[in-house]
Image: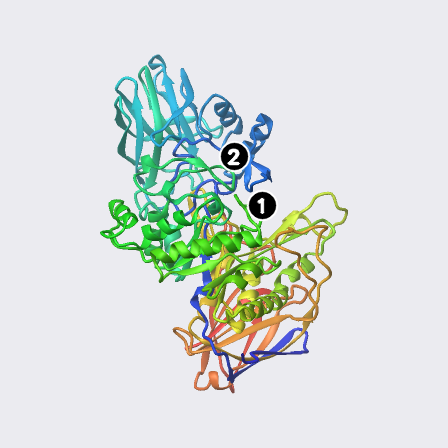
Amino acid sequence: MADLLRHTSGGDGTATVSLDPDRRADHDVSDELFGKFVEHLYSPWRVKNALEAQTLFNPTVGSWKFQHETYDADGGRGAIHDHDEIDERIRTYVETHDLPAADRLEAAYRDGCAFWWFHHGDGVRTSPDVGTAGDRAQRIETDGAHGHAGIAQWCYLPLHRTERFEGDVALRATDETTVRLAVHETDADGALGDPVAETTVRAGTTMATREFDLGVVDYDCADDAVFGFSVTTDADANLVLDHVRCYPDDHVETADPEVVELLRDADLPVLRWPGGNFVSGYHWRDGVGPVEERPTKPNPAWDGIEPNLFGTDEFLRFCEAVGCEPMVCLNAGDGTPGEAARWVEYCNGDPEETEMGALRAANGHPEPYDVTYWEVGNEVYGPWQVTWTTPDGYADRLARFREAMAAVDDDIEVFACGNRLTDWNDPFLAASDDLDWLTDHVLLEAHADASTDPVELYNAHTGVAEQLSEEYAAVRADCEDAGLAGTRLAITELQLFTRFDEGAEGDAMTEDDLPRNSSITEAVFDASIVTACIRDGFVRMVTHSGVGNHGAGIRKTRERTHAEPCYYGQRLGLSLAGGTPVGVDLTCGTFSTAATFGADTAEWFGTLDPVEDAPAVDAVAVDDPDGHDAAVLLVHRDAGRGDVDVELAGGALLDGHGEVAVTTLAAEEMTAENTYEDPERVTPTTETHAVEDGVVSLTLPRYGVVRVTAD
């Protein structure tokens, strides 16, 4: 491999970057270094799968799981049942989602009402019942003497996009009756006023699904208005409600159109789904077929439920709408090789020659999806996974899964669940005569407190690429020693985490000073790692965490969606795809950090090693990327110094170019992020810079990433 980066220490507020196209890599930049990962999360911060356009909380009136914080012996986390702990968790949910009153939800939950729903009107009794799929349904008994009564919830509506909504409700009654579905305005205390939209459906004596439409037309309200959604009747009635779904009419096959548009605009290459920790207890058959036949189950890894409204077909249609390659992570926890093989067959099997292909066709998609990428398990080395295992245990699972899947489709590419930090990889590397992909997760957690220097914490993260490069060199050598030189590495989760620990003395930092993954820090952190991957060529895919309130990428709040800084950072990096990395001679200052922060970082992800004399600036350049003649990515990694003036000497790569486009993603503080109130605080800007005697002069901001492109 060519020596692509040569660093010389020098300068303080200046750097020189000289490109040498005679030093060239033997690989091109893969666009799959800029993928994303999405997981089914229903914790207090997410609640709903953000890919969905569904507006209601707990639309299947499922039995909500309030997750315990400790792991069970067989992996995963069970539920808490203490009323005080549950009330505290409900208060967290309500505060996080800016809803009016936790006490009303607490009381309703103790009164047999599905969590997120509460009694509306007088003379209402609720109790659990059994749904079509054998899961929880909601029994609602009303006294017609008191007018409309039933259950309701608070919700937000995307009225900035559309005024019309559509959905369906599955219910029955002991005696046939009329049921009203309505949207209400609410007051400051959450009380529901008169309906601003309503419709009715007929409930018969057998469970049936009824479609409905609602129009919240010409209703003038604040953007952050809280609405009520109610299911009521004005008669003496005994109802059983199985589900009620409500989507804006601009949904894309039940998916959120804003999320689809953001990912389509980003030219997203690959999307990993459905987990994450979630997948180790997920059974794909629960999420296909008619919605009323899909069971709602406790989320196997997180707070909440899995309503199974967004399953395999919804995900793959989502990928078709975005234009990206799907990557399916398999349940190698409590799942079986046969279950995995049938999942492959469902996605890729011929509809006339295979049982699962025929099932897919019956579910509305005759043509095979042709899913190529299949990952066997997620972090099954840890007790936070349902049915975790040992290194030799995984070697056995991997071999059995691969054999079963290849018997169905030998054109798929299989990803083995890896771990660079232990001896985890050794047994299956030794037992494999061929391995398409090895995976790794880079989820680096650092604990900080009032005595922590924010600059040191920031620099420990931006400098981790030095540590990671050494660790991946060792993994690559292990693969080669095992006769697996063609194996590629995929980082299937990438993200920084910082936690603030109370109790320490000091005034260096508060919790508000943390450089979080929703801030510009994540964009710089990601770029520092991806530049190293581009140079090395061993890592050929990164599915960054995550989409939809999963730390970083796309944030969805009150049914409004905005992109976070790392989303824009990935778009900058994607401009290098297809190009060939060339040599860079870099002269700039260096930075170092102290030892690992905090008494104990997350034990399964390892610690942040001290950084010694790392270049304050990183640079990677490519020749002939898609859409450009040349592209350069510059990363400022040292928060301890201010802006850096850069002299970029392009040599032959800039010959004939009188100007270049310089796109900057930057912020004034390491904590700067995009918010509901200010969704475009950190976004890229592009300017034209002159090329004079083959040199471009520019400034690299203290907290920033800069891309230079020559067309």
Q: Quadrant of the N terminus?
A: bottom right
Badge 1 density bin: few <14, some 14–19, many ≥20, Cα 10 Å = some
Q: Which mark is residue 362?
A: none
Looking at the picture, tell me which residue is in the foreground, 643 or 233: 233
The residue that label 2 is drawn on is 94
On screen, residue 176 versus residue 113, left or right, reads left
The residue that label 1 is drawn on is 383
Q: What amino acid is at disc 2? A: Val
Q: What amino acid is at disc 1? A: Pro
**Quadrant location of residue 32?**
bottom left
Percent coordinates x, y for residue 452 in the rendering: 72, 53
Which colour style is shown? rainbow
Above or below residue 616? Residue 357 is: above
Percent coordinates x, y for residue 102 in the rendering: 53, 29
Percent coordinates x, y for residue 297 in the rendering: 43, 36
Looking at the picture, tell me which residue is in the foreground, 58 or 274: 274
**Quadrant location of residue 703?**
bottom right
